Image (tube, rainbow, N blue to C red):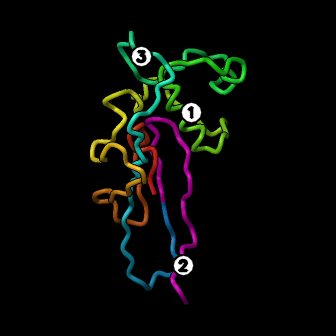
Amino acid sequence: MPLEIVDFTSAPQGYAGANIELAVGLNRNDVNVTYQWQMMRPPVEEDAELLHDYTDEADTSYYFPYFDITEAELLAMNPDATWPGIEMYLAALEAAGGDASVVDMENGTPNTFVEGENTPEDAPAGLEEPVWEDIEGATAGTYTFALDAENATYT
């Protein structure tokens, strides 16, 4: 019988601080298998356009100031609205195929679009393709991590 993946955790959702478990199951126990979980560093835009004016902002973290409406509802009412971190919200919305119901940004999330923060530590500026990096020590059939702004995309 050929070795096949029979169970795989795909696109788990959570909130900042939540523990997320990824798992893969195989159809056979009689085969030695090695695992290596990886983290994707997304492409970096060299000159990302900032939509919000951060000139007088001491803190550039994500901050959506309304509690009675969603970001999508505000943008539907006022397409020119901005707030600190709107660039991250729009990037997440685009990654979700425009489905605002799956985009959940936490106030206080570090803004990766502000100058000096838009390049992941080990990725060269102007990177055109995502980079997959091995997660040190993540070599079992399951992998658990605390979700935060720095580790939101794994495979």
**Residue drawn at 42 percent across, 37 percent down:** 149
Which percent across, then down, holds residue 90?
56, 33
Q: Amino acid at mark 3?
A: Tyr
Dot 3 crowding, Cα within 10 Å, few <14, some 14–19, many 20+:
some
Viewer-side residue, 24 vs 118: 118
For disc 1, the marked residue is 90
Front tag of 2 and 3 = 3
Label 1 secondary element = helix
Which label's residue is closer to the chain start, 2 or 3?
Answer: 2
User: Which numbered dot is residue 4?
Assistant: 2
**Residue drawn at 42 percent across, 84 percent down:** 31
Which percent across, then down, holds residue 72?
66, 27
Most distant residue in the bottom direction: 1
How far, Cα to Cα, is label 2 from label 3?
50 Å
Viewer-side residue, 7 vs 37: 37
Dot 1 crowding, Cα within 10 Å, few <14, some 14–19, many 20+:
some
Which label's residue is closer to the chain start, 2 or 1?
Answer: 2
Q: Amino acid at mark 1?
A: Leu
Q: Examine the rendered structure and indicate whether residue 37 appears above or below residue 47.
A: below
Which percent across, then down, holds residue 104?
57, 33
**Residue drawn at 57 percent across, 67 percent down:** 7
Q: Which residues are magenta?
A: 1-22
For disc 3, the marked residue is 54
In magenta segment, residue 3: yes
Viewer-side residue, 128 vs 8: 128
How far, Cα to Cα, is label 2 from label 1?
37 Å
In contact (CB < 8 Å): disc 2 and disc 3: no
